[in-house]
Amino acid sequence: MVSKMKERKPVIKVEELYREYAKLSQRDGETESIKVLKGLDFAVKEQEFVGIMGKSGCGKTTLLKTLGLIDKPTKGTLYFCGRDTRKLWNDELADIRRRKIGFVFQDFYLMDSLSVSENIMLPMVLDKKDACSCMEKGKAYAGQFGLSHLMKKYPYELSGGEKQRVAISRALINDPDLILADEPTGNLDSKSGKTVIDALERINEKMKKTIIMVTHDPQVASRCKRIIFLKDGVILEDLKRTGSEDEFYGKIIEKMKDL
Amino acid sequence: MKRKTDGEGKHMQRLQAAVSFGLYGADILLSFFPWIVIGDDQYNLFQLALVMKDNGLEELIAGVKTYADMENLAAVKAGILIELVFFGAFFLCSIFYLAAVLSGKGRKLNIAAFGTSFAAYYLHMTMSGYAIWDITTDRTLGGVFPGMMTLLSGLELMTVKIMGIWKETKRLSEESRKKDLREKKEKQERLRFYGRYSELFYRFVWKNFKGNWKDYILLLLCSILVFTFIVTGFGLNRILGAKSRYEGMDQILGGLNGVLINTVIPLGIISVIIIVILTFYYLRCRAKNYGIFFTLGMRKMTLQYFVVVEFFALILLTFVVGGILGTGILCLFSAKSEMLMGEHTGLSVLGAGTYFSAAAGLLLIYLTAFMAARDIFYDFNMGRGTDLNAVREEMPKRRQTGFLVLGLSFCLISILRYRRLKNFESAYLLLLFFAGIYITLRCGIARWLEGERKNAGYLGRLMVHNQLFHKSKTNTRYIFAMAVIQFCALFYFSSQMISVMIAEDGDMLYPYDIVCMANDEDEDIFQRMEKKEKITRREYPMIRVSNYDSTEKPEGALDVKPPQGQHIGISESTYHELKAQLDADYQRTDLHLDAEGKRIYIVHQQDKSVKAQPIDFFMSRAHPLLHAGTPCINASAVGGNIEENGYYFKDIAGEEIGSLTGAFRQGLKDNLVVFSDEYFEQAKELWKTTDMTSGRQLSEDTEKIPGVDIRQGPSRLVLIHTEEKDISGLESELAEFKERHREDEKYDLTVPCYYTKQEAIRRLRTERVMKITMNLSLLIVSLFVYLVLLSVKMATEADMVIKRAVFLNCMGMRQKERGGLIRKELLCYYYLLPVTVAAGSAAVYTAAVFYARQYTGEDILAYLRLMALVWAVSLAVTGAAAFVMTEMYVQKAERRKEW
């Protein structure tokens, strides 16, 4: 088992990652540069469940957008499954997003004009898969997450927890290597939140998927195997889970005081 | 590392060697050519050297007339020797170079060879008196041959170099081509996306598009409306703009084109605003879905393809439906105008060009809209942590009072200037007013909100003010845009329409049936007319008066001579007589004119619907720049004293708006310029001493040849009363009169030598129908644009309003109160406030127009009666529509809240 762990390859590896934004100052009308990420170095290996924590504005979402290849770093290197993303064309990045990455957002990002089943199938359809396999796989995932009875409904007819489960099913349908979740329980009540985090844990353990999740909630974070604490765009601590969930929760609470 | 020479390289080397051998071979042969001619003998370079060595220079040139410095023969000898050394060096270099080329040991010697040949030639040509050239008796041959040598060696150097560079360039370009090909192949391989999209894909895309169907329809309808107006505008221009079968159409077209321009410009601005706002709004609505596609990995090209298809379909539908509607309106106009103006008006037929121009216009508007919405294309707002709707907009804080005063000053300056006739109700003043209104609204609202926060009852009104406070910039812009649109409807378009409705009828505007600008030689024509038909003739002395600039264009491009205008100059006595002719009770009053002609009185011959305008637009319009005579085409105000050209800045002693002889050119031309009787007598004679092209005074009698140097122009103002039916009987005389006065009309065809009332009334009727139709359409469009703005504002804030309704419900606010909050917010800030600003400003500007156009009490009363009706209908319609829309909005917010 130990030897197997050692063999795991990094899905994501970042070296000296910087991200800056230009902002027009309202006071003097000049453009100022805002450094959001300041030289991050870390790697996330296969089957890891990594949480990213930090105060508002510390760069969590920017980091997630960069890891998800939606945004490009200003400086530094980002390797996805060993490939240097700087050397990839935009369409290749789109292909990676479609096939290798699943996204789960706090606001769900479901299409109101498509039904639940259509929302789940969307990434497969965009990948030019045939209609039969799309429908088959869509049904299977909906079944796994208890959505079978909602297939013909539209997102505006669902509860928050149901919407998030649809989003998770959609994220999984193309069998990606990495799931990126941006505060997936942020808009949910505690019961729905628990269902969602249980689902993510199951995906990590049973389906062997790598997950990177941004969260504010220490309870949710304690379900991760590793937490990266961000402060002002730099890594404050890279905490690995040892011991029980409760012990890990205690450590997270302790660390959060430094944020 | 030595580069391996390939087959192509060897071929190039062989070619280079061939060139070198060819050119240097010729050079060597030239060295043996006996080009040095001394008397009867000819020598080549070697022979010359030998002869000089054996016999000496003196003997060589004995008995021959040379150009050498014979008093300094030693120096000549030295010069020739130096030259021979250089030629010798060139010869040796050439030989060694060819040997090197043969053995393939580099090519640098050709530089040395060229250098020596150039030096030898330079010495040959420049050592005047001491060179071989100076001892040759055939100077042509002596000059050409050494030059040929230098030329050939230079040519060789250049050709070989270019061949070398060509070789290198070709190699590099081949390498680059191969690299590009490799990269292209690699890119194709890496980006290959096999297979076809399933039917599900197209169904999803269609459903997604259908999700924003209402917004698309709104954009489509507005787009069709705009295109219909563009087609109508271009079509009318085409129909009325082409040359007609009748000469009189020129005059009609002048007025009609003015109406069209006045219509097209505001219409264009409104079209751009409406399309930009709706496109921006539509793309914002679609951005969320585009963003989901993008994040889930749809390729950008595919995404862009769907955006393009959506807009392509929209534009295609717009072209078809808008084109049909526009054509329908134009057909209707043609049919009705034939009825109004008679078949003889000869309208032109629409062509494909009209539709192409209209389509280009619409595409330009969309291009502007896409440029305004470009950020949406670049960023689909995906995964953004910040909700853009939640970001607070800063209110102006610094120098608030200063800006407020500035804004109010702009408004005040604009209004005060607008009421002055000399400012011709300028559109620039309206733009200044809009700038002032924006600054005032921005700073005024900020100041008021700050004051409110300090008030004890602030918390009670917190919810109503919150949105205005939170999004101060966006909401102020909405209020401003709505106020401007309403102002256009209530003032700009309605005043143009109403003033036409109250304008004088034809009989008052054209008191005489025929007006001729004649001279003494025309007496026979008038006598024949009197014999032929029953006419009454009145005659007054006149002179032509020209003004320097008859265009509204702002000054600045002074290097261009502006088109001059032409008016009728009369004496004070004539003025009083003309007045008395029209009004039996007229009391003669002094016009306070001077004998020097500095002070003038102006009668702007135009009706009440035409905007007040000065007689001359050059520089200071308060002092028109006038010339007593026909326009001098060479007169220029650039870089000289314009008074030398006989153009003088005059003081206006008084002016009135009205018609004494006929408002044929509606205040643009043929106004009456009244001089004192003393000056008029002098001015009548001025033409005899004035150069007709430059306007300068002529002193010599030889320079005063009539028709060549000087020309009188019209001198008699002939006013004829006759029956309408008799005018046709005078056609031949009028045609002859026109023929005699071709020269008078040459400068400006729109100032003819005679006018008829019949023709003028026909033109007036057409213009008025056009003006009313156009302005009424624009008024309706403006009100519609206001409602579109209101609906866009409601739609963009709908989510926020629903969330707020949920929140307020949770906080225990009653439904009635929640509805009241939305009503108060929308109706107070986005109906009452803009309407109050617009109506207040429109009232002030209407008063300014009354003043500028010198309306009488009766005119004002008639105007206000119609204005009250137009305003009441406009405000009631927009008010009712705004109220219904607000109610629907309240219901929507409450309905959505429930689940």
Image (spheres, grey):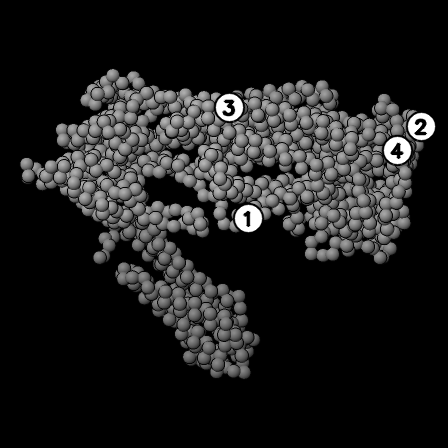
Q: Residue at x 18, y 29 (%)?
A: A198
- Quadrant of the snapshot with the N terminus of chain A: top left
Tell me how far mark 1 sits from mark 4, CA to CA: 55 Å
Classify residue B84 by image quadrant: bottom left
B586 sits to left or right of B249: right
Q: Nearer the viewer, residue B380 or A168?
A: A168
- From the image, tell me which residue sits under label 3: B885
Q: Position of residue B612 (x, y in %)?
A: 73, 38
Q: Nearer the viewer, residue B840 or B519?
A: B840
What is the secondary structure assignment of the residue under circle 3?
Answer: helix
- Chain ID at mark 4: B
Q: Looking at the rendered structure, which numbered label has been put on residue B401?
A: 1
Q: Are marks 3 and 1 in contact (CB under 8 Å)?
A: no
What is the secondary structure assignment of the residue under circle 1?
Answer: helix
Tell me how far mark 3 sits from mark 2, CA to CA: 73 Å
Tell me how far mark 3 sits from mark 4, CA to CA: 56 Å
Q: Position of residue A121 (x, y in %)?
A: 27, 23
Kindly tell me whether residue B710 is visible in this rendering: no
Circle 1 crowding by C-alpha within 10 Å: few under 14, some 14–19, many from 20: some
> Quick check: B768 above or below B624?
above
What is the secondary structure assignment of the residue under circle 2?
Answer: helix
